[in-house]
Image (cartoon, grey):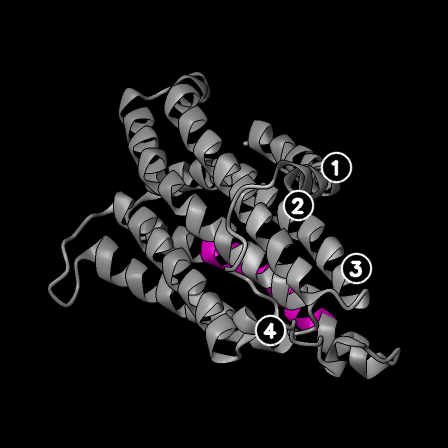
Amino acid sequence: MAQAPVPSDLKVEISNRQIMKIALPIALAMVVPQLNYLTNNVFLGWLGETELGVAGITGVFYMVPALIGNGLSSGLQAIISRRAGENRPAEIGKTFAQAIWIAMFFAAGAILLTYLFAPYFLAVSLQSAAVEKQAIDFMKIRIWGLPFLYLFQLGNGLLIGTNNTRFMKYAFMTEAGCNILFDYLLIFGKWGFPELGFNGAAYASIGAELIAMTVVFAVFFYKKLNKQFSLFAYLRYNISLASLVFRQSAPLVLQWAISIVAWLFFY
């Protein structure tokens, strides 16, 4: 079966316009998670000062594994860009599949570590038993959004690596809008939804991440990128290719982790 050729629009021109066209969606990708964090804090601040303080701690705690996904995405972008330049579209799909495997391993590890060590860390950091319980309950819910977030970040990495950054805006706008809407509905129990209070922000963020991931993958199918790059044709785990993705991503993952861990200890 013949492979579909890589389209010419993967070859970028070196111009200020082209640089801005690629860079602006990537910059937006960095802003939206911070906007979601800020949105949660604004809504939770209406519940009281205690909730706002706990939101700050749990938000920074979640950002540690969340930003690791940025490292994975950046490593994926580098490999995908190389494969596109080599006119090997099928290799893009193979690489993307192995990145998904690695991301799910990371997500499973982060969920396990959260359940095992987050109670101890928060117990040391917080002086109130009631606040401690609230923070632990929140994190045990919030961390389940990580697999969706990682898939969303990897999807963005694919769009960047194949010069399709213009489609990233749909997922970003959807995620930001859904997070605001779900915060309002679930924290305060509006429009017939249950009033979940502090934990409502956790469910709201998970829902927004799930929808954002769905939008990115819908773009793959709508624009036929799944066929163009054989995205889901090679889903079996490949240790050599997975090792390549991991080696490419590991320094970036470490960089992101170190950068945010300092803030976690500050909080």
Q: Is residue 43 above or below residue 86?
A: above
Q: CA distance from mark 3 to mark 2?
A: 17 Å
Q: Label 4, on which residue?
A: 228
Q: Which residues are magenta?
A: 23-38
Q: Quadrant of the N terminus?
A: bottom right
Residue type at tag 1: Pro
Query: Which comes sooner in the sequence, label 4 or label 2?
Result: 2
Residue type at tag 4: Gln
Nearest-to-viewer mark from 3 and 2: 3
Tag 3 and tag 1, C-beta contact below 8 Å: no
Q: Label 3, on which residue?
A: 82
Q: CA distance from mark 3 to mark 4?
A: 16 Å
Q: Label 1, on which residue?
A: 251
Q: Label 2, on which residue?
A: 71
Is residue 5 located in the magenta-colored stretch of the structure? Answer: no
Residue type at tag 2: Gly
Q: Is residue 162 above or below residue 187?
A: below
Neighbour class for label 3 at 10 Å: few (<14), some, many (≥20)?
some
Q: Residue at x 51, y 46 (%)?
A: 236
Q: Is residue 2 above or below residue 264?
A: below
Q: Quadrant of the C terminus?
A: top right
